[in-house]
Every structure is written in structure tokens, then in C-alpha cells.
């Protein structure tokens, strides 16, 4: 009599133990498939590794040309995989039961992990997906809405006002690279051009010399500033005289 390991009953366990039949196929020809399947089903890396090991042993058995050696390896593989499959069946059924019971939570956790990775990649921060608890009546809803709108205005307005502009004529390469749409490569070019011209006189001159596109100009305009460059021509001329 088969022992029941989960809360889902004997019928469910038998239906989800079909993969053991793969190990019963003569000479273990498809035993590795069973371990790859259950390893992927319950996300168990150890069982997947066993699947690849059994596949490698099977290949060795098939390509061995010595008389009788290949058959011995195949029969040994067959025996080991059958015993192994029956030994890990209880653990597989329990893990599958837990996974099914928490499938929605696991799925949400994976989605949340992907979202966090995406936000980290694109430099986006902040809480998303959170919703306020349901309110009991309309008056509470109106009060809550007013509070939310007020707090939203208070939180958004300072963010719009606090825009730290970077002086292109004085900033370092890393500071220029931190400006949206610029990056480290364009920042290096900015430093080179700034040294060549002795500093930028205006944003228009900067965008023209750097050959910026229109959409890039609109995005970075509010983040940059240009200090007055004095005696630019005199420095350039004196430099030329010294070089001459």
C-alpha cells in the first residue's frame, strides 16, 4: 500500500508520479528526462544536475566500443536511476504540494523581483503597486482623497523645484556623466571640447559644438548651467604664441 505524503490524496500523488515510468524504460535510455523534468517542475537545481549526469553516463554507455562494457554501464545506470527515482519521490511530492499551495505567492514574488531589477536598471525608485485600505463611507473617501491630493502636491512640488544644475565649464567628468542623456562617453567628449574652446559661452554654443539632437537638448537643458568664461580669446592666443 502506497504511503500518502501530501494533503492532496493518493490519486493526486499517483497522477504526479508518472515520471517514474521514464526510469523503468529498459537500460535507462530516458531516465535523465525524469530528473530534468522534476528538477524544473519544483525548481530543484540538484535534481536537474543529476539529470545531466545520467545523460552523460548514458552517452558514455552508447559510445563505448569495448565488448560488454557499454551494456554493464547501461544496466548499472538503469538500476541506479530507478532506485534514485523512488527515493526522491516523497520529497518531490511534498515540494510540489507546497509549490502548488503557494503558486500565486511565488509568482507574485518572481514578478516583484523582475520589477525591482528593472527599476534598478533604469534608475527608478519609489513604492509602486501599494493601494490604500478600503474606506467605510463616502465622507471618509472624500477626506482621504483631499489628504492624498494635498500630500501629493507637497511631495511633488519640492521635487520639481529641487533641480541641481551642473556647471559644464567647471564640472568634472563624472559630474557631467551623471546628467541624464549624457553618460560617460559623451562626458569625455565634453571635457575635450571644453579644453579646446576654453569653455562654453552658452547652452546654444554647447549643443551646437557637441552636435546634440533635439530630443536630447530638451531633456538636458534644465540640468546644465554655464558660468561666464573670461579672457577666453586671450588665453587661446597666448597658448598659440607659446606653441609657435
Image (cartoon, rainbow, N blue to C red):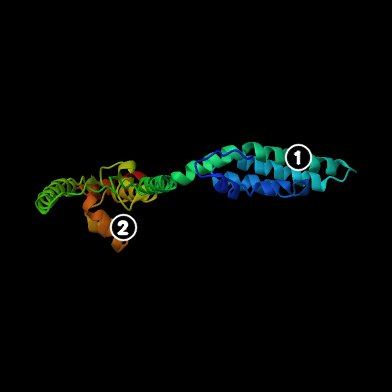
Q: Quadrant of residue 49?
A: top right
Q: Please, is residue 52 above or below residue 220 in the view? A: above
Q: Residues within 10 Å of mark 2 (few under 14, many from 20)?
A: some
**Front-most of 215 and 120?**
120
Give the structural element (helix, strand or loop) at label 1: helix
- Residue 46: image location, x then y, percent: 60, 38
How many numbered tags mark residues here? 2
Q: Which residue is mark 2?
A: 209
**Front-most of 104 and 192?**
104
Is residue 241 visible to the viewer in this orientation of the structure?
no
- Residue 19: image location, x then y, percent: 64, 48
Q: Earlier in the sequence, mark 1 or mark 2?
A: 1
Q: Give the residue furthest to the bottom.
A: 214
Give the structural element (helix, strand or loop) at label 2: helix
Q: Which residue is mark 1?
A: 79
- Residue 52: image location, x then y, percent: 67, 44
Q: Is the N terminus in the top left, top right, bottom left or bottom right quadrant? A: top right
Which disc number belongs to residue 171?
none
**Front-most of 191 and 237?**
191
- Residue 61: image location, x then y, percent: 80, 44
Amino acid at each position: 500500500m502506497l504511503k500518502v505524503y501530501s494533503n492532496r490524496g493518493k490519486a493526486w500523488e499517483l497522477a504526479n508520479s508518472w515520471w517514474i515510468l521514464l526510469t523503468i524504460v529498459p537500460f535507462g535510455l530516458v531516465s535523465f528526462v525524469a530528473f530534468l523534468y522534476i528538477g524544473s517542475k519544483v525548481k530543484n537545481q540538484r535534481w536537474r544536475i543529476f539529470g545531466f549526469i545520467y545523460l552523460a553516463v548514458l552517452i558514455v554507455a552508447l559510445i563505448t566500443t569495448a565488448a560488454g562494457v557499454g551494456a554493464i554501464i547501461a544496466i548499472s545506470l538503469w538500476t541506479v536511476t530507478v532506485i534514485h527515482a523512488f527515493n526522491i519521490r516523497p520529497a518531490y511530492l511534498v515540494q510540489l504540494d507546497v509549490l502548488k499551495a503557494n503558486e500565486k505567492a511565488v509568482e507574485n514574488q518572481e514578478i516583484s523581483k523582475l520589477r525591482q531589477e528593472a527599476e534598478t536598471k533604469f534608475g527608478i525608485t519609489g513604492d509602486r503597486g501599494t493601494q490604500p485600505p478600503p474606506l467605510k463611507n463616502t465622507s471618509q473617501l472624500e477626506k482621504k482623497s483631499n489628504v492624498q491630493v494635498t500630500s501629493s502636491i507637497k511631495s511633488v512640488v519640492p521635487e520639481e523645484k529641487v533641480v541641481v544644475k551642473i556647471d559644464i565649464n567647471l564640472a568634472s567628468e563624472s559630474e557631467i556623466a551623471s546628467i541624464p542623456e549624457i553618460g560617460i562617453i559623451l562626458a569625455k567628449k565634453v571635457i575635450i571640447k571644453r579644453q579646446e574652446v576654453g569653455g562654453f559661452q552658452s547652452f546654444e554654443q554647447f549643443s551646437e559644438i557637441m552636435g546634440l539632437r533635439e530630443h536630447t537638448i530638451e531633456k538636458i537643458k534644465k540640468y546644465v548651467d554655464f558660468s561666464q568664461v573670461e579672457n577666453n580669446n586671450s588665453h587661446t592666443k597666448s597658448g598659440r604664441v607659446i606653441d609657435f
